[in-house]
């Protein structure tokens, strides 16, 4: 059993015991269908995660968990909608790392910290820096050498201005003392097409989004951004291994609820999520299909993580005057 699986099993055992003291109102929940807001379109990674967990929760809790895609403005439209819903335990949001970044990129009709209660940080996944095999870059040192020899000659694509890919590469450029040209895209699909076609020198996205093309030889991964090597790309070194000590950045997936949602309901949902994620078929799907390092954090751990991500990336946005697309 992996360390992550052992941790999840231990969490499940503790939560089963703790649920014995949950008030009757929470024990009865849910008594009607539950709305699961996904502030992104179908496809990508957030939507399949929500549908995978929603289907399992529907089975275990006896009520439908209905996924609603409310898209636009990097997730802000659907998140704003969810913030206005009753805090009665019948609306939850499955969101992405942009949840911590868009407050610094645009004026929002909600407060990311105050208008939501945390449920769970489901997992994280490092990014991969990739290039088309015909390009001359075999490791990150080659990129640095090319950028120093001819400034503004090396382009990198991300899924958009202010994405973790964009911000992490901004930090990397500062540490490496080079300037790369950022090419923002409206999502991973268009960026992937240009990376595969060689229109950009480098493509930066989650290991999950890039793994299939790397394994198929259509892209070459030259580095990943995690604190440790990605389990889906164990042969690819991290930036930290290549001399950028302490460098770590990752995509992540989180579940939140409108602020004021009864804590016993959040505790029950968290317990059910831990049990679902602990199932071998779901854990395998998250780990292999989404490239996720499963975390299954407590609500308290989730809030602490969110605030740390907001502080970290907010500073990068402000210091570099980064604007929304």
Image (cartoon, rainbow, N blue to C red):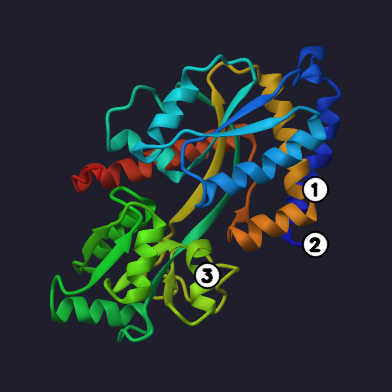
- Would you identify the image quadrant in which residue 139 lies? bottom left
Give the label, 2 or 3, closer to the camera.
3
Residue at (31% x, 47% y) in the render? 162
Left or right position of 198 against 255: left
Few, some or many residues within 10 Å of mark 2 (<14, 14–19, 20+): few
- In the image, is residue 101 above or below residue 86? below
- In the image, is residue 198 above or below residue 296? below
Residue at (73% x, 52% y) in the render? 282
Residue at (81% x, 29% y) in the render? 62
Whole-Å distance between the Cαs marked 2 and 3? 24 Å
Whole-Å distance between the Cαs marked 2 and 1? 10 Å
For the C terminus, which image quadrant? Answer: top left
Whole-percent x, y for residue 324 in the image: 25, 42
| Secondary structure under the numbered disc 2 in the rendered image | loop
Give the label, 3 or 1, closer to the camera.
3
Whole-percent x, y for residue 256 in the image: 56, 31
Foreground residue among 235 and 163: 163
Instruction: From the image, tell me which residue sits under label 3.
Output: 211
| Secondary structure under the numbered disc 1 in the rendered image | helix
Name the mark on residue 1: 2
Instruction: From the image, tell me which residue sits under label 1.
Output: 9
Few, some or many residues within 10 Å of mark 1 (<14, 14–19, 20+): some
Left or right position of 290 against 306: right
Of marks 3 and 1, which one's residue comes earlier in the chain? Answer: 1
Whole-percent x, y for residue 60 in the image: 81, 35
């Amino acid at each position: 059993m992996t360390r992550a699986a052992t941790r999840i099993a231990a969490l499940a055992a503790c939560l089963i015991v703790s649920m014995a003291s949950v008030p009757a109102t929470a024990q009865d929940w849910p008594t009607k269908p539950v709305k699961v807001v996904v502030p992104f379109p179908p496809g990508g990674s957030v939507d399949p995660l929500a549908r995978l967990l929603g289907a399992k929760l529907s089975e275990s809790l006896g009520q439908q968990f209905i996924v609603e895609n409310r898209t636009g403005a990097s997730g802000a439209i659907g998140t704003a909608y969810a913030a206005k819903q009753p805090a009665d335990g019948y609306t939850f949001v499955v969101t992405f790392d942009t949840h911590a970044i868009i407050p610094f990129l645009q004026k929002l009709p909600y407060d990311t910290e105050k208008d939501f209660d945390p449920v769970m940080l489901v997992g994280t996944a490092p990014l991969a820096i990739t290039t088309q095999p015909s390009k001359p870059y075999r490791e990150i040192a080659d990129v640095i050498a090319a950028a120093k020899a001819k400034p503004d000659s090396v382009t990198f694509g991300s899924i958009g201005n202010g994405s973790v890919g964009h911000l992490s590469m901004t930090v990397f450029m500062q540490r490496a003392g080079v300037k790369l040209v950022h090419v923002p895209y409206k999502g991973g699909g268009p960026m992937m097409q240009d990376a595969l076609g060689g229109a950009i020198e480098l493509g930066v996205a989650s290991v999950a989004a890039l793994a299939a093309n790397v394994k198929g030889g259509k892209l070459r991964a030259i580095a990943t951004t995690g604190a440790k090597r990605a389990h889906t790309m164990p042969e690819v070194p991290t930036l930290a291994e290549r001399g950028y000590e302490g460098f770590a950045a990752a995509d992540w997936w989180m579940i939140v609820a409108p602020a004021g949602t009864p804590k016993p309901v959040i505790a029950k949902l968290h317990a059910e999520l831990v049990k679902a994620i602990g199932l071998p078929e779901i854990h395998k799907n998250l780990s292999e299909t989404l490239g996720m390092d499963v975390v299954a954090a407590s609500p308290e751990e989730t809030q602490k993580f969110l605030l740390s991500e907001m502080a970290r990336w907010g500073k990068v946005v402000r210091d570099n005057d980064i604007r929304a697309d």
